[in-house]
Amino acid sequence: MVVMQRCWYLHVRDCGPEGFLAEANYTDTFIDQSLILEVERKTLVIKSAQLEVRRGKPEVASASVGNLVGITAYFGSGRKLREALGAAPALLDMASQALTAVIQAEIFFYQERGFATAAEYEDFWDKTYQNACVLYSNLDRVEQRFMDYVKDHQPGRNLFHRYLTTSLDISGEKSQICGHLMDSFHEMTLSLNLDQDYQIQKASASMLRCPDAVCREALARVPGLEGMDLTTGELKRYHEKCGGSTGCTHIGQLVQEAAYTLDIYQKNKQ
Protein backbone atom coordinates (compact mmCIF):
# COMPACT_ATOMS: atom_id res chain seq x y z
CA MET A 1 0.00 0.00 0.00
CA VAL A 2 1.36 3.41 -0.96
CA VAL A 3 1.57 5.51 2.22
CA MET A 4 3.60 8.54 1.09
CA GLN A 5 4.12 10.43 -2.17
CA ARG A 6 6.13 13.51 -3.10
CA CYS A 7 6.16 15.43 -6.38
CA TRP A 8 8.10 18.40 -7.74
CA TYR A 9 7.48 20.31 -10.94
CA LEU A 10 10.15 22.83 -11.90
CA HIS A 11 10.06 25.15 -14.87
CA VAL A 12 11.82 28.23 -16.18
CA ARG A 13 9.54 30.47 -18.24
CA ASP A 14 10.88 33.13 -20.57
CA CYS A 15 9.33 36.54 -19.84
CA GLY A 16 11.11 38.58 -22.49
CA PRO A 17 14.38 40.53 -22.59
CA GLU A 18 14.25 41.56 -18.93
CA GLY A 19 14.17 38.12 -17.39
CA PHE A 20 12.24 34.98 -16.61
CA LEU A 21 10.40 33.13 -13.85
CA ALA A 22 11.91 30.10 -12.15
CA GLU A 23 9.17 28.20 -10.36
CA ALA A 24 9.41 25.21 -8.02
CA ASN A 25 6.08 23.54 -7.28
CA TYR A 26 6.10 20.90 -4.56
CA THR A 27 3.30 18.62 -3.34
CA ASP A 28 3.38 15.72 -0.92
CA THR A 29 0.91 13.88 1.26
CA PHE A 30 1.10 16.63 3.89
CA ILE A 31 1.88 19.96 2.16
CA ASP A 32 1.42 21.77 -1.16
CA GLN A 33 3.39 24.91 -2.00
CA SER A 34 5.20 26.88 -4.71
CA LEU A 35 8.27 29.11 -4.77
CA ILE A 36 8.35 31.64 -7.61
CA LEU A 37 11.56 33.50 -8.40
CA GLU A 38 11.79 36.43 -10.80
CA VAL A 39 15.31 36.34 -12.25
CA GLU A 40 17.15 39.01 -14.24
CA ARG A 41 18.14 37.55 -17.58
CA LYS A 42 21.68 38.86 -18.02
CA THR A 43 22.95 38.66 -14.43
CA LEU A 44 20.71 35.85 -13.07
CA VAL A 45 20.15 37.93 -9.93
CA ILE A 46 16.88 37.14 -8.12
CA LYS A 47 14.70 40.26 -8.29
CA SER A 48 11.74 38.95 -6.32
CA ALA A 49 10.73 35.77 -4.48
CA GLN A 50 7.22 34.68 -3.56
CA LEU A 51 5.92 31.72 -1.60
CA GLU A 52 2.46 30.25 -2.08
CA VAL A 53 1.27 27.76 0.53
CA ARG A 54 -1.93 26.00 -0.54
CA ARG A 55 -1.98 23.22 2.06
CA GLY A 56 -0.07 22.46 5.23
CA LYS A 57 1.70 24.58 7.79
CA PRO A 58 4.33 27.00 6.40
CA GLU A 59 7.89 26.36 7.62
CA VAL A 60 8.58 30.10 7.79
CA ALA A 61 6.62 33.30 7.32
CA SER A 62 6.04 34.05 3.65
CA ALA A 63 8.00 37.28 4.00
CA SER A 64 11.14 35.31 4.86
CA VAL A 65 11.63 34.22 1.26
CA GLY A 66 12.45 37.87 0.57
CA ASN A 67 15.91 37.01 1.86
CA LEU A 68 16.48 35.34 -1.51
CA VAL A 69 16.36 38.69 -3.31
CA GLY A 70 19.81 39.71 -4.51
CA ILE A 71 21.19 36.16 -4.63
CA THR A 72 22.54 35.07 -8.00
CA ALA A 73 20.69 32.00 -9.27
CA TYR A 74 23.86 30.19 -10.32
CA PHE A 75 26.82 28.11 -9.25
CA GLY A 76 28.32 29.12 -5.91
CA SER A 77 25.13 30.39 -4.26
CA GLY A 78 24.58 27.41 -1.96
CA ARG A 79 25.91 29.12 1.16
CA LYS A 80 23.67 32.16 0.64
CA LEU A 81 20.66 29.92 0.11
CA ARG A 82 21.39 28.12 3.37
CA GLU A 83 21.76 31.43 5.22
CA ALA A 84 18.41 32.60 3.86
CA LEU A 85 16.39 29.39 4.33
CA GLY A 86 18.43 27.16 6.63
CA ALA A 87 15.56 26.92 9.10
CA ALA A 88 13.18 25.67 6.39
CA PRO A 89 14.56 22.48 4.79
CA ALA A 90 11.67 21.95 2.37
CA LEU A 91 11.92 25.53 1.10
CA LEU A 92 15.70 25.28 0.90
CA ASP A 93 15.32 22.18 -1.27
CA MET A 94 12.83 23.97 -3.52
CA ALA A 95 15.09 27.02 -3.88
CA SER A 96 18.08 24.82 -4.68
CA GLN A 97 16.12 22.97 -7.34
CA ALA A 98 14.86 26.23 -8.83
CA LEU A 99 18.47 27.40 -9.20
CA THR A 100 19.38 24.09 -10.81
CA ALA A 101 16.59 24.65 -13.32
CA VAL A 102 17.97 28.13 -14.12
CA ILE A 103 21.44 26.68 -14.72
CA GLN A 104 19.98 24.01 -17.01
CA ALA A 105 17.98 26.61 -18.95
CA GLU A 106 21.04 28.79 -19.58
CA ILE A 107 21.97 26.68 -22.59
CA PHE A 108 19.15 28.42 -24.51
CA PHE A 109 20.41 31.96 -23.87
CA TYR A 110 24.15 31.44 -23.34
CA GLN A 111 25.12 34.24 -25.75
CA GLU A 112 23.26 36.76 -23.61
CA ARG A 113 25.33 35.50 -20.70
CA GLY A 114 28.56 36.48 -22.45
CA PHE A 115 29.53 33.28 -24.28
CA ALA A 116 30.34 34.07 -27.90
CA THR A 117 29.91 30.58 -29.33
CA ALA A 118 28.43 27.21 -28.48
CA ALA A 119 31.94 25.78 -28.33
CA GLU A 120 32.97 28.38 -25.74
CA TYR A 121 29.92 27.61 -23.62
CA GLU A 122 30.53 23.87 -23.83
CA ASP A 123 34.17 24.39 -22.82
CA PHE A 124 32.93 26.30 -19.75
CA TRP A 125 30.78 23.31 -18.75
CA ASP A 126 33.61 20.87 -19.38
CA LYS A 127 35.80 22.79 -16.93
CA THR A 128 33.07 23.49 -14.38
CA TYR A 129 31.86 19.89 -14.20
CA GLN A 130 35.21 18.20 -14.73
CA ASN A 131 35.14 14.79 -13.01
CA ALA A 132 31.77 15.61 -11.40
CA CYS A 133 30.06 12.57 -12.95
CA VAL A 134 30.76 9.68 -15.29
CA LEU A 135 29.98 11.81 -18.36
CA TYR A 136 32.33 14.66 -17.50
CA SER A 137 35.03 12.20 -16.44
CA ASN A 138 35.05 10.47 -19.83
CA LEU A 139 34.71 13.23 -22.40
CA ASP A 140 37.24 11.44 -24.62
CA ARG A 141 34.76 8.55 -24.97
CA VAL A 142 31.57 10.58 -25.40
CA GLU A 143 29.96 10.03 -28.80
CA GLN A 144 27.51 12.94 -28.59
CA ARG A 145 28.43 16.21 -26.92
CA PHE A 146 25.71 17.98 -24.94
CA MET A 147 25.33 20.88 -27.38
CA ASP A 148 24.68 18.35 -30.14
CA TYR A 149 22.26 16.49 -27.88
CA VAL A 150 20.05 19.59 -27.43
CA LYS A 151 20.45 21.17 -30.87
CA ASP A 152 17.01 20.05 -32.06
CA HIS A 153 15.28 20.99 -28.83
CA GLN A 154 12.79 23.83 -29.32
CA PRO A 155 11.98 25.22 -25.88
CA GLY A 156 9.49 27.98 -26.74
CA ARG A 157 8.65 30.09 -23.69
CA ASN A 158 9.26 27.18 -21.33
CA LEU A 159 13.06 27.02 -21.36
CA PHE A 160 13.39 24.03 -19.04
CA HIS A 161 11.11 21.78 -17.03
CA ARG A 162 11.59 18.86 -14.66
CA TYR A 163 9.27 16.39 -12.94
CA LEU A 164 10.60 14.48 -9.94
CA THR A 165 8.50 12.06 -7.89
CA THR A 166 9.01 9.59 -5.07
CA SER A 167 6.58 7.12 -3.51
CA LEU A 168 6.77 4.85 -0.47
CA ASP A 169 4.91 1.53 -0.54
CA ILE A 170 4.71 -0.55 2.66
CA SER A 171 3.51 -4.16 2.59
CA GLY A 172 3.79 -5.98 5.89
CA GLU A 173 7.42 -6.00 7.04
CA LYS A 174 8.77 -4.96 3.65
CA SER A 175 8.65 -1.68 1.79
CA GLN A 176 9.72 -0.13 -1.47
CA ILE A 177 10.60 3.40 -2.49
CA CYS A 178 10.51 4.37 -6.15
CA GLY A 179 11.81 7.59 -7.64
CA HIS A 180 11.35 9.08 -11.10
CA LEU A 181 13.10 12.05 -12.72
CA MET A 182 12.05 13.33 -16.13
CA ASP A 183 13.08 16.67 -17.61
CA SER A 184 14.01 18.39 -20.85
CA PHE A 185 17.24 16.38 -21.10
CA HIS A 186 16.97 13.27 -18.86
CA GLU A 187 14.63 10.46 -17.86
CA MET A 188 15.46 7.88 -15.20
CA THR A 189 14.00 5.72 -12.44
CA LEU A 190 15.16 4.29 -9.11
CA SER A 191 13.79 1.39 -7.05
CA LEU A 192 14.85 0.53 -3.49
CA ASN A 193 13.47 -2.55 -1.71
CA LEU A 194 13.73 -2.32 2.08
CA ASP A 195 13.36 -4.75 4.99
CA GLN A 196 11.49 -4.06 8.25
CA ASP A 197 14.43 -2.00 9.55
CA TYR A 198 14.53 0.05 6.32
CA GLN A 199 17.79 -1.52 5.24
CA ILE A 200 18.22 -1.58 1.46
CA GLN A 201 17.87 -5.17 0.26
CA LYS A 202 17.83 -4.47 -3.47
CA ALA A 203 18.69 -1.32 -5.41
CA SER A 204 18.21 -0.83 -9.14
CA ALA A 205 17.89 2.05 -11.59
CA SER A 206 17.37 2.68 -15.28
CA MET A 207 17.95 5.53 -17.73
CA LEU A 208 15.41 6.01 -20.50
CA ARG A 209 16.95 9.25 -21.81
CA CYS A 210 20.43 10.65 -21.15
CA PRO A 211 22.93 12.83 -23.05
CA ASP A 212 25.24 9.95 -24.01
CA ALA A 213 25.58 6.17 -23.63
CA VAL A 214 28.49 6.65 -21.22
CA CYS A 215 25.98 8.02 -18.67
CA ARG A 216 24.49 4.53 -18.29
CA GLU A 217 27.76 3.21 -16.90
CA ALA A 218 26.77 4.91 -13.62
CA LEU A 219 23.96 2.37 -13.19
CA ALA A 220 26.52 -0.28 -12.24
CA ARG A 221 27.16 1.59 -8.99
CA VAL A 222 23.56 1.55 -7.75
CA PRO A 223 23.65 -2.02 -6.31
CA GLY A 224 26.44 -0.77 -4.04
CA LEU A 225 23.67 0.76 -1.91
CA GLU A 226 22.51 -2.68 -0.85
CA GLY A 227 23.06 -3.39 2.83
CA MET A 228 22.90 0.28 3.82
CA ASP A 229 20.22 1.83 6.01
CA LEU A 230 17.99 4.32 4.18
CA THR A 231 18.34 7.23 6.59
CA THR A 232 19.17 10.88 6.09
CA GLY A 233 22.21 10.36 8.29
CA GLU A 234 23.74 8.25 5.53
CA LEU A 235 23.39 10.88 2.78
CA LYS A 236 27.13 11.43 2.46
CA ARG A 237 27.68 7.70 1.97
CA TYR A 238 24.85 7.55 -0.58
CA HIS A 239 26.59 10.19 -2.67
CA GLU A 240 29.87 8.33 -2.34
CA LYS A 241 28.16 5.19 -3.63
CA CYS A 242 26.18 6.76 -6.50
CA GLY A 243 28.03 9.98 -7.23
CA GLY A 244 31.56 11.11 -7.90
CA SER A 245 33.51 10.72 -11.09
CA THR A 246 31.95 7.35 -11.99
CA GLY A 247 28.40 8.08 -10.83
CA CYS A 248 25.39 10.16 -11.84
CA THR A 249 24.31 13.28 -9.94
CA HIS A 250 20.67 12.69 -10.90
CA ILE A 251 20.60 9.13 -9.58
CA GLY A 252 22.26 10.47 -6.43
CA GLN A 253 19.48 13.05 -6.10
CA LEU A 254 16.81 10.35 -6.39
CA VAL A 255 18.49 8.34 -3.62
CA GLN A 256 18.66 11.43 -1.43
CA GLU A 257 14.98 12.25 -1.98
CA ALA A 258 14.08 8.62 -1.26
CA ALA A 259 15.77 8.98 2.15
CA TYR A 260 13.93 12.26 2.80
CA THR A 261 10.64 10.62 1.78
CA LEU A 262 11.08 7.90 4.39
CA ASP A 263 12.15 10.47 7.00
CA ILE A 264 9.10 12.69 6.39
CA TYR A 265 6.77 9.72 6.55
CA GLN A 266 8.21 8.50 9.86
CA LYS A 267 7.99 11.96 11.44
CA ASN A 268 4.40 12.52 10.35
CA LYS A 269 3.03 9.12 11.35
CA GLN A 270 4.10 9.61 14.98
Image (cartoon, grey):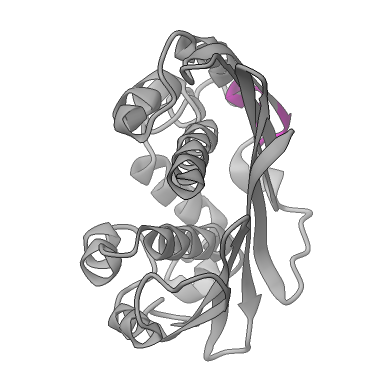
Judging depth in this view, the residue of 140 and 168 nearest the camera is 168
Q: Quadrant of residue 171?
A: top right
Report if residue 244 is visible in the image. Answer: no
Q: Residue placed at 44% from the left, 25% from the top?
A: 230
User: What count of labels does the image hold?
Assistant: 0
Q: Residue placed at 53% from the left, 16% from the top?
A: 196
Judging depth in this view, the residue of 115 and 19 nearest the camera is 19
Q: Position of residue 166 (x, y in %)?
A: 63, 42
Report if residue 213 is visible in the image. Answer: yes
Q: Residue placed at 40% from the left, 84% from the top?
A: 62
Q: Quadrant of residue 145?
A: top right
Q: Residue placed at 56% from the left, 80% from the top?
A: 21
Name the residue furthest front.
Answer: 270
Q: Position of residue 124 (x, y in %)?
A: 40, 50
Q: Quadrant of residue 144?
A: top right
Judged left or right of residue 37, residue 157 is right
Judged left or right of residue 235, residue 267 is right
Q: Which residues are magenta?
A: 207-215
Q: Is residue 157 magenta?
A: no
Q: Position of residue 127 (x, y in %)?
A: 35, 42
Q: Position of residue 12 (x, y in %)?
A: 61, 71
Tell me: residue 95, above or below residue 180.
below
Quarter of the image for the C terminus: give it: top left
Tell me: residue 222, above or below residue 46.
above
Quarter of the image for the N terminus: give it: top right
Q: Is residue 211 magenta?
A: yes
